[in-house]
Amino acid sequence: MPGATAAFGLRTRLVIAFLLVAAVSAVTTAALTYREARSAVLVRAQDTAVASFREEVEQFVPSLPLDPDSLRWYLYDIAARAKPHPWIVFAEYGSLRASSGDRPVSGVLTQELRRTTLTSPHGSFERVVKDGSAYLTIGMPVMTRVVAGGDAVPSGLVLFAVMPMTNEEVDINALVTAARDGALPGLAVALVPALLASRSVLRPVRELRRAARSMGGGQLDTRIPVHGRDEMADLARTFNESAARLERSVEELREAGARARRFASDVSHELRTPLAGMLAVTDVVDEDAGTLAPDTARAVRLISAETGKLAVLVEDLMEISRFDARAAELNADEVDAAEAVRSTLSGRQWLGRVRAELPDGFRIRLDPRRFDVIVANLVGNALRHGAEPVTVRLSVRGDVLITEVHDSGPGIAPDALPHIFDRFYKADAARTRSSGSGLGLAITVENIQLHGGTISAENAPGGGALFTVELPFDGPASGCGAPGGPLSAQSGRRPAAGRARKETTA
Amino acid sequence: MPRVLLVEDDPSVREGVEIGLLRRGHEVLAAETGEAGLEALGAFRPDLLLLDLMLPAMSGVQVCCRVRETSQLPIIMLTARGDGSDIVVGLDAGADDYIVKPARTEVIEARIRAVLRRIESPVDARPAVERHGELDIDRAGHTVFTSGEHIALAPSELKLLLYLSAVPEQVFSRQRLLEEVWGHSYHSDVRLVDACVRRLRTKIEDPSSGPRYIQTLRGFGYRFGPL
């Protein structure tokens, strides 16, 4: 009964089962008791009545020929000695009818009784219920005197006794009432152990549920107290062991992840110091390259250029490491979005190359430096890999600021779309390391997520790649830059899964 | 050309920056530790201190504090991005600006020029000394007095005060101030402005009441007055 299982809780089902058992046993006991008691009461009254009536009839020697008046006097006599209850005596002989009551013929006597009485020398009896009242009817043939060597024969006169069984009825009804009155409080009392039993089963189940939910919420050190040695205790023990194993392996994973991130961060740190020295002298090298022998000049320029790229790569690696370590800080400030984008474009001398649709008046809370990185990466990406004209458009929908960057290039290859926000992903093998670190879009995504926003990429209907950034106006929701569980680092505010993304080496 | 005292413990950075600045005509004295740098101050008399934030024994912040005890020498800190709160501590200690390593010499030089650049005093018929409440500002002489007492202001503090007080009651966004006072071309760290305002307030404001001269407009920026 899966329907019923689903409809009722465990407690309800346990209580119902308990009550059913109690009810069945109460009803069975009552029924058996009733039957036994009833027959005992009836049989006793019946035996007494039949025996005494037979005795009366045997002693009855009517004078012949039968005279109705004297017969009635005999009947009165017999009726006066009724046992155990009063009875009314009827006599039938041929067409003669007489009784000790006010009517000569009883309406309770059946033809069946009359017939069996005539054929049985010891008489017969029958219980009859008429108009809701029970009667015991007894028929006895009056036998002739026993002559020597012969059997007694029926004289043809038959006496009937009709005894109302009112007292027995009352007794039996009292039994039924007693059984019912006993069963109902019994059921009520059964409710108490039912509730206690269900509680003792349900408490561990509830604890288990609470613990499982707590584990699911990331509290891996959740354990259940183990009471006793029953099946519930076994279950609790198994749960605790599994939880401990899970906690251990998660801890190991966490440490491995932390080690990997620390290593990446340490490597970048170590690379940065020599790079700082090298980068400071690239200007000197570049200026003097013209005075060197052509081969040397080419070599020197190569070193200088690659030093610059290496510096960008190391900075980007460090930035990614900070995101991975949840150590990225968000220094939010309220700014005018259009002003911020214009400032990014003008700072990089892009104002002439980019069509800007920037309505004033969108004031938004964000980290200006990070917003600059977001816009610069997307526009730089569009200028490098797309084609001009590049459009930057600001708009508002609900409580999010939408920043769109659209280029007029060939768009993004469909098989590249799902990967373009991946670290070091290169959509075009022929265009390897044209510039940038390969981390630009990954950093862009992290910066957007730090603000509680999303990014998506697609090929616009009219051609070209379209990147759409959505940032909430009221700033990052909560806890930005705060270290969270490393395992949750990649979950949560990812861009919508079904939406496309694009490549960069910004 | 300005004389630059460079305090940097890492040899390659020290040498690289020294070569780059020398090449551009600066006079450079490179010191390896904070102690050596402080010692060289008197004899070398630099126009500017280029100070690494992370020094082994005496930290850049400590050096910064020691310098500010006696002098308003322009100070630019060399830091790594992600040093985070250390930057704020350095700025509160009195640094005028900071540069994130690794940086090209042209970036370092541009920042040095910006810090050393003076705010042009408006060429009009203003009096030599402006009086705002208890505050006397001598635009030509680049000196400031409160209640007649001379206040020593670091270059960034002085420039910020001169810039704000030139147009009293006008609100300037922090980005605008970064561009105008610090010469930063695009979005950079507004904590520079906040730290500078904090330092300026401790010098010119009455600590027992709220800010009177440099007022904050939440969400918009800062303004001078109204008194």
Image (tube, grey):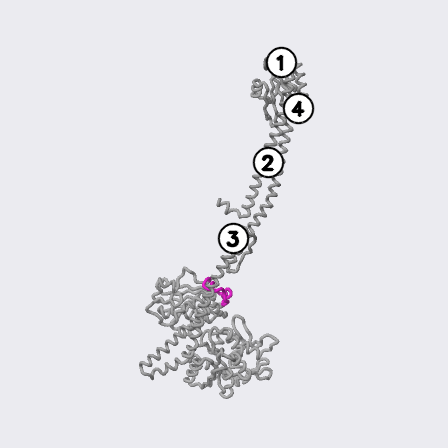
User: Please, what is the three-letter code of the amino acid marked with disc 1?
Assistant: Arg
Q: Give the magenta-colored segment's residue range.
A: A472-492
Image location of residue A76, percent across then percent down: 67, 18
Say which label, 3 or 1, has the lower sequence index.
1
Q: Which mark is residue A30?
A: 2
Q: Look at mark 3 in the image and give the residue it sits on.
A: A235
User: Please, what is the three-letter code of the amino acid marked with disc 3?
Assistant: Leu
**How many numbered marks have been drawn onto this rendered protein structure?**
4
- Height in image: A401 above or below A56? below
Q: CA distance from mark 4 to mark 1?
A: 25 Å
Residue A477 lies within the magenta run:
yes
Image location of residue A87, percent across then percent down: 65, 22
User: Please, what is the three-letter code of the amino acid marked with disc 4?
Assistant: Lys
Determine the residue positioned at 58% across, 41% down. A22
Q: Nearer the viewer, mark 4 or mark 3?
A: 3
Tell which residue pokes out farthest to the top in this image: A65
Q: Name the element at disc 4.
A: loop
Q: Nearer the viewer, residue A412 or B69?
A: B69
Q: Look at mark 4 in the image and give the residue it sits on.
A: A83
Q: CA distance from mark 4 to mark 2?
A: 30 Å
Chain of the residue under the numbered disc 1 shown in the image: A
Q: Nearer the viewer, mark 4 or mark 1?
A: 1
Q: Which mark is residue A145?
A: 1
Say which label, 1 or 2, has the lower sequence index.
2
Say which label, 3 or 2, has the lower sequence index.
2
Residue A30 lies within the magenta run:
no
Q: Residues within 10 Å of mark 4 (few under 14, many from 20)?
A: some
Tell which residue pokes out farthest to the bottom in this image: B43
Q: Nearer the viewer, residue A453 or B204?
A: A453
Chain of the residue under the numbered disc 4 shown in the image: A
